[in-house]
Every structure is written in structure tokens, then in C-alpha cells.
Amino acid sequence: MEVSNPTLKVTGSKNTSLVGSVKSLYGSDKAGGTGTLGNGEKEYIDDFLAEKDRNSKASYLDVKPSKKGTSSSTRFSRRSLTAGQNREREADLDTVLDISEKAYRYDDTGKTAYDNACKRYNVVPASGVLKALPFEEEIDIKHYGMGPKGARAMAIPLVINNNITTLNLKNNCLEERGIEEIGRMMCENTTITDLDISENNIRTTGANVIASFLKFNVHLARLNISNNGFEDKDAEIMASAIEENARLKVLDLSHNNFAVQGGITFKSVIAENDVLEELDLSWNNIRTKGAVAICKGVKENIRLKRLNLAWNGFGDDGAEAMGVALTKNASLVELDLSCNRITCEGFLLLIQDFAQNDSLKVLKLGKNMIRDDSATTGLQLLRRIPNIALTTLDFSDIIFFSDKFKKWLERINKKHKELEVIHGYQHSYGKRKLVTYDPVREAMESLHKYIIEKGLTVAELFSTFDEDGSMSVTYEEFKEGLKMARIPLTALQVEYLIKELDKDGDGEIDFSELVVGAETHVYT
């Protein structure tokens, strides 16, 4: 009778515990099980578990029979055999245990897992991922266009990999399905501290995913989710998770569609979170009550160091509320309120109590509607303060012509030598480059932003200026239209814009001239 040669596989405890954690996180792999993401869940788990089985560091016991065979027709009786025959029979029944470990190499970098996943999902492997997984700490594949399937293939190795700390997936067409794959990975990953998933159009589904992994992941320190189509309802979804996260220090929420209610929602996030150090809410639509609410959050905050609120609509009410907040806040070092529809009145309300703040070093107010006389008064107020923490007052892209302003600028430079006042058109931070700056382009970009915010076309915007439907407007009609729309342009920008648009010099701006101007200065 021939003896078969079975192989006994002993599974290590590490693999068993990890399998259990993945099943509990991603859902059951049995019929009727539930998971966080529904369709495709079992397939995802099976792929992961299969990869772990292939890579397991298990020991193997090989059972090998003796080379001496026995005839199946021979019947043995211990009594019928001699002592020598008994010894020979026992030797025949012995087995040899080979307890040496098979040479199965465990790939803890995830490179093998990534190769297999790409084959499984018919995805072309990204060379940047293949190179980074074994040796690097950063995967940077921004603008790669991997899509949802590529995201699924990459998520599997990042559950295994223990050396990647920075992951940049900016502008990769992840959309809703792709962010689900990244979210599941982030719930399990313990090494990634810097994640950029900006410009991926993940919307409300993405907000839910982000809220989920921020509750599980206690390692992430920097998160960029700008330009993802988030709205006020998405702020409510993410707010609690951000507020309670004990690790996140840098958060970028810029270039989204947060408005009044979003500002009110983020008030509690700013007030209650005592870990976040940098917050970017620029290029949103936060105005009126939303702006005031954020200022109240700043007033109560004890940790935030840098806050970017540029390109919103805080206005004078928001500026006044921020001035009050700065009298109580003792942590903020840099504040950006550029292009926020702040007028002369709002500027003076903002800085009138600066003597009570000893932490703010950088204040940016460029592209606001601040005139020479108000700027001069502001310098006079600052000069009266004996010891001022402020080192940079930035009026970029605002030109002050008066001799009085220049005189007071010289005086404040003598009193506060550490304070730098920046004004005029800026090509680069702190350097005056009047020739290289393009005020027309800045003005057209402001118009373009307004059109996007309001969901208008160029034709619809022009029609609000053109009351008689002649497809042509005078300079005064154009200026009045900009004023009524509250588009944040300085008087000088308006003059440059009119001069640029009126190509034929007939004293009027035609619709065709506006279209050509937009194509020349925005879309090129």
C-alpha cells in the first residue's frame, strides 16, 4: 500500500490577527456579511487575504514515507514474524519529518501585491508606485489620472507597506468610488502621515469617507482636500471628525463651495480643536454670518497658528469681528484676509485694538478696497503701540500715491524697525515689480471667479450691465455693473480693465471684446 505525501501548513499568529482585523474593518467575507462600502467588498477582501496567504512566513512540515514499500496483499501478524522481521517491519512504517522552513520570501513592501492587483484589475502599474514601494517614504503621482480601478490596485499594497509616510494623489480622477478604496486603506494604514487627495471631485461621498477614516486613523498629521466640490452639507459631515481628531495639524479646505452655513459649522471646529495648527479656507464663499462665526471660533481657539481666509467675502463686518477675536487670541501667528471686500472702515476696525495682541506677526490684506487716507491712519494707530508683535503688514496689489502715506511709512519704520509694510504690485513676496504684474489678468480672474460662484456665463454677466440689450456698454455702465455685483476690484484695476477691453477705442465695451479679454487673460 502506497502512503500519500501530505504537506501540513502552520499559519502564524501575525497573519491570523491581521486577517481578523481586515474582516472586521471591511466587512464579512461570507455570504450575507456586511461592510462599509457594499458592492465589490468581498472581492476586495479576498484579494487582500489571498495576498497575505501567499506572503505568509509559515513553517511547513513535510511528511515523507520510507522508500521501502509494502505489498497491499501481504498480511502481517506480529506473532508470525521473527524478531528480525518485526524490526524490519517497524522500520518500514517509520516516517521522516522535514521541519526545515521553505524558502517563501515575505514581501512586506507591497510591491508584489501591487503587481498582482494590477493584473487582477487590468490596470497599468504606475512606475512611480513600483519604484517607491520598496525603498522610498513618499509616493508622488499627482496628475496621473489613475481613476477608481487604479486606486483599488494601489490601496492593497499600502495596507501591507510600512515605510510610505507621504501620499500625493492630487488630481487623479478618483471620484466617489476611488475615494472609497483610499478610505478603506487609510482605516488600516499606520504609517501615512501626509495625504493629498485634492482636485478629485469626491463631493459628499468623499466627505463621508474622510469623516470615517479620521475617526479610525490616529497617525495622519497633514490632509489636503481642497478643490473637491464640497458644500455646506459636507462641512457638517466632516466637522465632528475633524474636531475630535487628536493628531491632525494641517488641514487644507480651500477652493470649495463652503458658504454661510459652512462658516457657522466650522466655528465649533476652530473653537474646540486644540491640535490643529494650520487651516486653509481660502477661495470659498464664506460671508456675513458665516464670516462672523469663524471669527468667534478664532477668539476661543488656543492652538491655531496660521489661518488663510483669502478670497472669501468677510467684508467690514467680518473684519470687525476678527479685530475683536485678535484681542483674545494668543496663538495666531499669520492671518490672510486678502481679497475679502474689506473697505477703509473695516480695515481700521480690524487694527484699532492691535495693542492687545502680542502673537500675530503676519497680516495680509492685499486686494482689498483700502485707500491712501485709511492706510495712513492705520500706520498712525500702529505707531502709537509701544511694542508690536507684527513684523509684516501686506497690502499687495494696492498702490498708495500720497505723500502723507509715504511720510508716515518712514516714521513707522523708524519706530518699529522690525515691521515691513508691503504695498504696490507684487511679482514675488516682498519685492516690488511694477512692470511684471498684470492688473488686467487679476481683474479678469476676479470676474471669472464671480461667474463660477454665481453659475453664470459671460453672456449672462454682460446682460446685467447691458440694460438696453445693445450688446455694448459705456464705461460708466460697466463700472456701475461691477459695483452692483460687488466684484472685489480696485479702482485702478477697473481703469486698466476698461482700457484693455475697449480695443477699438470707441468709448464703449462690446460683448465680443469682453469674451476676447476673458480668453486672453484667463483661459490661456
Image (tube, rainbow, N blue to C red):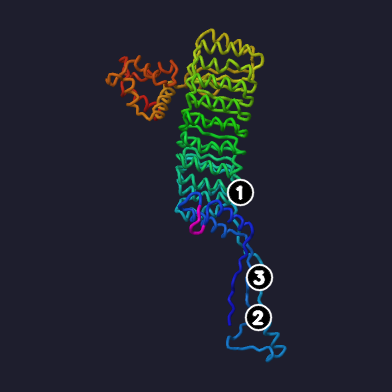
| Location of residue 14 in the rendering, given as x and y in whole percent from the top left corner | 63, 56
Within 10 Å of the Cα at label 2, are there few (<14), some (14-19), or many (20+) other Cα atoms?
few
Marks 2 and 1 close (CB-CB < 8 Å): no
| Location of residue 277 in the rendering, given as x and y in whole percent from the top left corner | 60, 32
As drawn, 294 above or below 382: below
Calculate the distance from the C-alpha at mark 2 to the C-alpha at mark 1.
Answer: 48 Å
- Which disc is residue 162 wearing? 1
* Magenta highlight range: 29-34
Q: Which residue is mark 3?
A: 98
Residue type (three-letter) at the residue carrying disc 3:
Asp
Looking at the image, residue 524 sits to the left or right of residue 401; the answer is: left
Residue type (three-letter) at the residue carrying disc 1:
Asn
First-in-chain label (3 vs 1): 3
Quarter where residue 77 is shown = bottom right
Q: Which residue is mark 2?
A: 93
Q: What quarter of the picture does the N terminus occupy?
A: bottom right
As drawn, 336 above or below 230: above
Residue at x-position 30% and y-position 15%: 506
Marks 2 and 3 close (CB-CB < 8 Å): no
First-in-chain label (2 vs 1): 2
Q: In this rendering, which labeled residue sits more in front, label 2 or label 3? A: 2
Res 433 visible: no
Q: Secondary structure at mark 3?
A: strand
Q: Secondary structure at mark 1?
A: loop
